[in-house]
Every structure is written in structure tokens, then in C-alpha cells.
Amino acid sequence: MMRTIFATLVAGLLMMSSAMADPLLASVFGDSMVLQRDKPIPVWGKAEPNESIVVSLGGKTAKTNADAQGAWMLKLPRMKAGGPHELVVTGAGKPLALKDVLIGDVWVCSGQSNMGMAVQDTGRTEEGKKEIAEANYPNIRLFVVMPTTATTPQDELASHSPWASCTPQSVLGFSAAGYFFGRHVYQKEQAPVGLVMTAWGGTCAETWTSKAGLASLPEFETQLKDAEQNLPRLVQIETDYQAKAQAWETQLDTLDAGFQNGVPVWSKPECPTADWRPVDMPLSFAMLAGTNPSKLGGRVWLRRDIDVPASWQGRDLVLNLGLVRETGRVWFNGTEVSRFDLVYRFWDAKTAAIPSSLVKAGASNTVVVLLTDSANMAGMFGDAGTLQLIAKAPDADLKPISAAGSWQMKQGLAVEKLTPRPAPPSYWPNNPNMPTVLYNAMVHPLIRMPIKGVIWYQGESNAGAAYEYRRLFPALIQDWRRAWGEGNFPFLYVQIANFGCWQPAATEPRECTWAELREAQLMTLSVPKTGMAVSIDIGDVNDIHPIDKKDVGIRLGMAAQAIAYGERLEFSGPLYKSMKVKDGKARVAFTHAKGLTVKGGVLEGFAVAGPDHKFVYAKAEVRGQEVLVWNDAVKSPAAVRYGWDFAPECNLYNAAGLPASPFRTDEWPGVTVPKADATK
């Protein structure tokens, strides 16, 4: 036995020694990758100190030596689109050869969840299923940066998928907006396309911006100082908070009707449930925005019996709860198997490990989940497909058992009877919304790779600070351009879509954070070589993640045709240009207004106000390349707004079939203007 262990150790050491002698490429390189055409091609990696490195590609060769730390980098001459090629790196050890390398255009696809929304999530319709089945594009290549954070800029990615040719299988987990964009570009340019997805749902723009980029914004001075103080202390901050949170939960146990003398009696399988009421799980994602159809909150107990087949005898299980809000515990057949505190970590999915000793194979098993929720939004709100019981059996093909559907619920402690919970920290390990941490981990490792441009879908998480976004978003664009050092590469982005299920239906025009965020995005078009895809007509009032990502990708692709590839075509919907008033009516002029038209007969979405700043809905009609706007009650129009709401009804288009961007003609302080600015 000892001889076998020793032999294994020797073999491992030999393998390590051999690996150290071989030149190692950076993580962005791999088989089936795409390298940017018409630009010098940098190649870099790690080797032995001072080792001689030779790289060849498509008949081109370059040489260099690693530095004293083993880092090396060289540049191959620029190449035209084509391939496949073999990229060979030769050092002191065995040459490293990457196969099936194409030369084409590389686009970075970044942002929050609407960029991260996968192609498989668009397959809920017949059209979506057809699109997936037809996603065979060998010259489109996909690369995914896995979500991670870093407190300082990293040279290497912590985790990523390998490069892959686009197939119905490989595309499933890739960005839907990115895929449809890449397909549009490929079909128009007929050159290989590499798509690099680096996105994380629910994230703010400041976390995607470098320290230097944020330092250019005075309003982020305090945040940067806080980050410098707290980022090195993440583990200690969370440890201190967890101790306070646990003490709070223990106190609540004494108030919760589900406990008797400290014993969780409602967790027992034999607990009577006649007065528990049914509730469907998982609850709708819309609940996060304030809707709470089940009126949960406080201390909520959830229970479900699950039949476990006899074939699962002796197997450990995993209960996948998906996304959970906020803190809680899990019991399986009366035994506690998990505790969690997700009040400030609601990006994290939750699982509970269940040892085989607790499992009753061939019988019904009781799952009880206790949620403590101070925000009156408790529940498990992930996808129904993720709420399931799984057998840990890599040697067997055992299908998971769905735990979605009807559960039982009972409130152990009303939300108004909760004692104040400890304030959660702003900083904790792997929090994606700390300043700079996603730039450090998910962008900085990419900046030595030449690209054609960036597509971006983000903004929902910054809507509460939309006025600030006017400066933050342009600063992010300039920050990335500075980091890549390639000048003003095209930066194309999506204006956030119509959504607002948490809002009551508007009976009159109102101020709106989301409208102000769209305005900030519209204003960012003043940055050179930017383009905006308007999506105000293809959202879903009830879903912050609208399924139509095909039109998003096409509209981004049209912007790329014009801005990145210099084609002459209409690539934008109508954009506000100017307003003049005559005879009590406002005439609004637009750019990109050729063939201005209305879909649906009656032009909707306009409001007008007089000098009193009070807006009322207005009548409107197209007059050539202008829109005439009026309300007989407003004798002296001072301002016009269009699409100024969370989920407005908008139907103004141009001849290219592209929708007009929401806008306003006034500069009156909105709801997101900082108090200091509002008084100016």
C-alpha cells in the first residue's frame, strides 16, 4: 500500500515538473478560439524564468524570453479573417498546440441578468425551440467568464468555460442577447465571430468599473474610501455579522409559535397541519419588486411531503431550494440539515445536504423550511425547474424529483412582531456589488485580448440613482477603452425595457426612476462610437427578464453594422432633437425620423405640461418628420414627455421598424436627483 502511495506521489511530482517546464498560456486562450482580425495579436502566459518562447500561427512567428518571474508576452503580426489555424507555443518543454483557431471579430458581451439570460431560457415558445435547434454556426465561437469577484485587478480568470463552436447544445447556457447579436453580425459580415460573455445578474455599473475609473467621479469618493478600508476585511466583517444575526435568530425562537421551550415542534413530520394553508412554490420573481400575493413575512414555515423511490435507498441527497429570501433553516424528516443567512446574499442559490441515514426510500419524506423575513417578501423565488430533490449518485441515472408546486404554509411570527434585525453589511465575500470587484475579476483579465467592441445590457440595478448614472455610465465606457488601449472601440448598449408589475397602473403622468435611467442611457450617446438599442416595446410588464432577446440582438447588430463596420443603414429609432410651440401645440422634431409612423392607429405615450410643471396625457399625431402634441387644457405648453413611465405604452417608429426612445424636453429635477443638485 505504501509503495503504491509513494509511486503515485512520484508520478505526480514528475507531472508537476513537466508542467512547469511547458509554456502555459493565459486562461483566455484555448482550442476553437477566435483572435481579433486586422490588429497585432498578443500572446502571453507563464513559463520558467528567462525561458525562450516561440509562437507560430498561420505562417507567422514571433519570439521572446520570459522575465525573471516567468511572465512572457509577444505579438504576432495582424492577420485577415480566416482559419482554422494552429497556434503553437514552444519553450523548453513539450510544445503546446491550440487547434481550430479562427481569425475574426471578438465582441465582449457584458452587463447584468438581461445579458446573462441564457438561450435556453428563450426556448419556452415554439419559435424559441426552433431557434435553438437551428443554432449550428461553426464559425461563431463562445466563451463564458464565470461569475466571481476580486478585491484587486487580476491577470487571470478564476473560472471560465472552454471556447466552443456554436451548436444547439453549446449555445444553451450562453447569453441569448449575445448569441442573437453575434449571429446577426456573422450573417452580415461572413467573418468568424468570437463572443465573450462576462455578466452577473443584479449588479450595478460601479462594480464593473475600475478604481481609476471611479476616481474620476467625485460622487464616488466616499465609496472608494469605504472600499479601500473594507475590502481587505471581508471575512472578519461577515464573521462579526453572523454572530449578531445568530443571536437575533435565537431570540426570535422564543417568540415563534413553531417553537416550544426551544424545540422546533413544527419541523416534526407528525406535526398536525390541518390549519396550514396551501401555497405554490416557488413564488414569482416579481415578488422581489414588492408584490406579495401570499402575504408572507415575519417567521414563515413551509412544508412538503416528497415520495422517494426505493431505488434511492442508501444514497445521500441534495435539496436544491434555488434562490431563497432571507434567512432560514431546513429540516428533513425532523432533523435539521441546513441553516443559512441570505438577507444580503440573495444572489446565492441554496442547497441542503441530506445524509442517507435520514432518507426513507420507498416512502414519503417530510421537508420543512423556516424562513425569517423582515421585508415581507419571504419565499423561494427561483425557477420551478431548480426546486428539486437530487440523489447524489454519479454512477446511476436517477432523475431529480421536483419539489415545485403545492406546499403548506403557516406563519409562526407576524412581521410586525419581529424585533429589529442587525443591519447587514455592505461588504462580504463574493458580494458582486462592491465597487470595482467585477472589473477586477471578470474584465481586467481580458484587457490584453484585442476586441472589435462591447455590447452591454445593464441599468436596472442603477435605476434608483439614475441621475448619477449620467456620469457613471460614460465613465465606465471610457474606463474600459483606457484599459484596453485600443482607442474608441464601438460600445453598443440596450436601453432598459418596459417593466413595472410592482407599480400600480398609472392614472396620470408621474415621475419615474426607470424613465430617468433610460434618459441617462440616451444621454450617453454623446460619447463617441456608442449606439443604443431601444427595447421599450419588447419588454414584459410582468417580467424583468423579457423573453424576446432576438430583437435585442438584431437591434444591437444593426448598430454594429453602422458604427463598427461603416455600413450605410438606419440603425436607430427616432431620437428627440428639439421642440417648438405654436398656437398652443408643441412640435417635436427627431433625428432618425425618416418614415415616422405609428403602430396601432392612435399615437400613445405622450404627455404635456405648462409652466406649472403639471403633466397631463396628451393627444399626438405624426406630421412628416415631426410629432404634434397638445392638450386643450394646457394653453402654453412648456414641456413634452414620451414613454415616461416604468412600462409605458409606446408606438412611435421609423421606416426601419425601430421604436422611438422615451424622452423629455424639460430639465426639471427628477426623483433621482441628489438633494444638492435639485436645489441648483
Image (tube, helix red, strand yellow):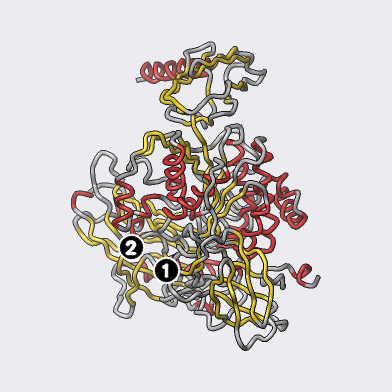
Which residue is at a point 65% across and 85% down the rendered structure image?
Answer: 634
x then y, percent, for residue 272: 30, 75
x then y, percent, for residue 240: 63, 55
Q: Looking at the rendered structure, which numbered label has been put on residue 583?
A: none
Q: Which residue is situated farthest in the front direction here?
A: 624
> Is 618 on the left-hand or right-hand side of 395?
right
Q: Nearer the viewer, residue 45 or 602?
A: 602
Q: Looking at the rendered structure, which numbered label has been put on residue 367?
A: 2
Question: Is 680 situated above or below 32?
Answer: below
Split into 4 quadrants, where in the image is the C terminus?
bottom right
Kindly tell me whether residue 567 is visible in this rendering: yes
The amino acid type, in three-letter code, at marker 2 is Val
Mark 1 or 2, nearer chain start = 1
The amino acid type, in three-letter code, at marker 1 is Val
Label 2 residue SS:
strand
Kindly tell me whether residue 254 is visible in this rendering: no
Which residue is at a point 66% across and 80% down the rendered structure image?
Answer: 609
Disc 1: which residue:
263
